[in-house]
Amino acid sequence: MSATSATSARPRAGFKVPTKWVTISLFLLPALALYLLFVLVPVVQAAHYSLYKWNGLQPLDNFVGLKNYATALGSDTFRTAVSNNFLIIVLSLAIQIPFSLSLAVLLNRRFTGRTIFRVIFFLPYVLSEAITGVVFSLLLRPHALIDSGFSSMGLGGLIQDWLGDPGFVMITLFVIISWKYFGFHMILLLAGLQGIPREIEEAALIDGAGRWQAFRHITLPLLGPTLRVSVFLSMIGALQLFDMIWVMTRGGPLGASNTMAIAMFKAGFQSQQMGYGSALAVILFLFALVLALAYQRFVLRRDVEGAVTAFNG
Amino acid sequence: MTTTASTSTTTSISAIGSRRLRFVRRNLLNIARYVILVLVAGLILLPIVYAVLGGFKENGQLVGDPLALIPAPWVLSNYTDVLFGVNAGTFWREFANSLIIAVVAVGLTVGLGSLAAFIFARMVFRGREVFYTLFTLGLLFPAAVAILPLYILVKQIGLGENLLGVALPQAAFGLPLTIIILRPFFRSIPVELEDAAKIDGCSTFGFFWRVLLPLARPALATVSVLAIVGTWNAFMLPLILLGGQDQWTLPLGVMNFSGLYVSDQARILAFTVCAIMPAVIFYGLAERQIVGGLTAGSVKG
């Protein structure tokens, strides 16, 4: 009752207050329209197109039901692409994130030069993935910097056909992806570590816990929310891998470095199979959705928002 | 009584020994820390430094002695060609295209995003959380999902092979993050301030424009910076939606340039370095906003 009287008291004589809904529409509609038109509608359209055999030019009239999906699931090329995405996810979780965490721990002390290291480690994150790919392609050419580096250290035997060997190309790409993105995860985890009061770990040390024990049983659990955000972002990132791989290998050699996004791009724009390509897009969407739902289910929603929202100054 | 006294003396004696031990250990740990950090920093910087210096080399040296870091002789022509010479037309045109797309996209993302975030933060109405969730969905799936229909759509509305045809979808894809970051910030500004502004005759937009936005400057800086980095480095959308070379942005241009001058590595490196310089300089200026924006929340987590 009092709330109503307060709001109705607000408009004062002399100027007209637009009704609530007019304000809401004027403020919200532009963003909503842009977002619907260019993000949500295309996603829905992808689902629609995926039910047709269509080259993107002719009328959309050759309805084939779920045939595109059946083709995709039966295709060795696409299965390789999916397994490549998952290989990157597994490697990221097993190697990249522990590596980022170790460096975050090393940086979580006050010492001279800390800021410089932090700035350097994060630097690759702001570079374009495509341009990064161009630079590494040059360095990985036979007898270029990387090969010569191995030879000069007496490790010539380890030299591979980095981007040309179907059995090795994903490893090479993973290392470059880590080069570019570990700093991002490190910064995230470092921020998380700095949010943990030092006293808690010190108390455990005084109580006789070893450093590793204190880390394992005190710090790590407290870092949980941040770690989960890092894991989630890493997985979503690995699912949509495209730019760097397109620049460096175009999915080759022999499809060995295809990812879902690369396969989709090739289907849509190289073989003019818009319907099939859309089916691949929907499959990619479903993977991301399952991931997101699992994340919502197992991890508090606050984690996601916390990762990118709150401001502490 | 006596037991406490004796234990305290033993601890003080062993404390001297363990303090020495701890001193040595701490120094060793510090040295190990520096060694590891310097190694990793070296691995991060090596490709970048190598590219920068490579742009000053002759191709003979790049191919013949790839391990040499310092150019011998120093050659300026690669960089001067890119910035002022034969390749300058290409470089600056691509730079301008990147800049136009970034300015339009970031302007729209931040402008429209803050209007929407304002509504989500300070208005109570039915369906608010539904609309908000709709926007947050955009963060959960890869942009690639929308790309094929987007290609068709942009052509249909007459923006095919047009810089605006890239900028608009780019802005749309930037909205979720912008709104999610701005909402809690807008919400934290006290209601009393809004009431006071209203009593002084401010309209809702007047409050938003004259009171809220100036107060939210740090948050706006953060979302702008994140949007700039995102748009500047975008690759897939421009690759699909842009027409001929006169519309290409820098990432597309670099890829094409490296295919064009396959055997002129020094020139590729010079072009590449010039292309990443804007991002590096921008990072130098806005490091605090970039890092702060991406991480501030997880501190709270």
Image: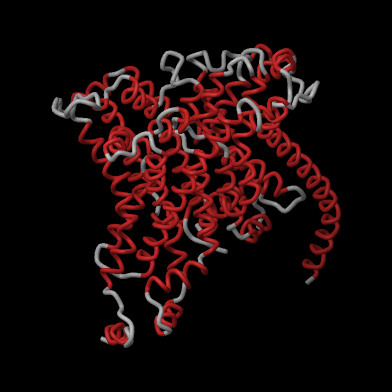
In which quadrant will I find the N terminus of chain B? Answer: bottom right
- Residue A219 visible in this rendered orientation of the protein: no
Residue A186: image quadrant is: top right
Does residue A34 lie above or below B158 as drawn?
A: below
Report the side of B74 relative to B93 (left or right): right
The residue that appears at 66% across and 45% down in the rendered structure is A119
Residue sitting at 71 percent across and 39 percent down?
B37
* Percent x, y of residue A83: 39, 25
The x and y percentages for residue B290 are 57, 50
Determine whether A252 is above or below A265 in the image. Answer: above
* Observer-nearest of B123 and A38: A38
Is the residue B244 above or below the residue A27 in the image? above
- The answer to which of A284 and B14 lies nearer the viewer is A284
Tell me if A80 is positioned left or right of A108 in this view. left
Q: Position of residue A132 (x, y in %)?
A: 57, 30
Q: Name the residue located 27 percent from the left edge and 58 percent from the top edge.
A: B130
- Image quadrant assignment for residue A158: top right
Please state the horizontal and vertical placement of residue B152, each as a whole percent of the image: 28, 34
Q: Quadrant of residue A238?
A: top left
Left/right of residue B29 with respect to residue B152 in the rendered view: right
- Residue at image position (61%, 30%) is B88
Colouring of the image: secondary structure
Q: Nearer the viewer, residue A226 or A128?
A: A128
A99 or B169: nearer the eye?
B169
Residue B202 visible: yes
A25 in relation to B98, above or below: below
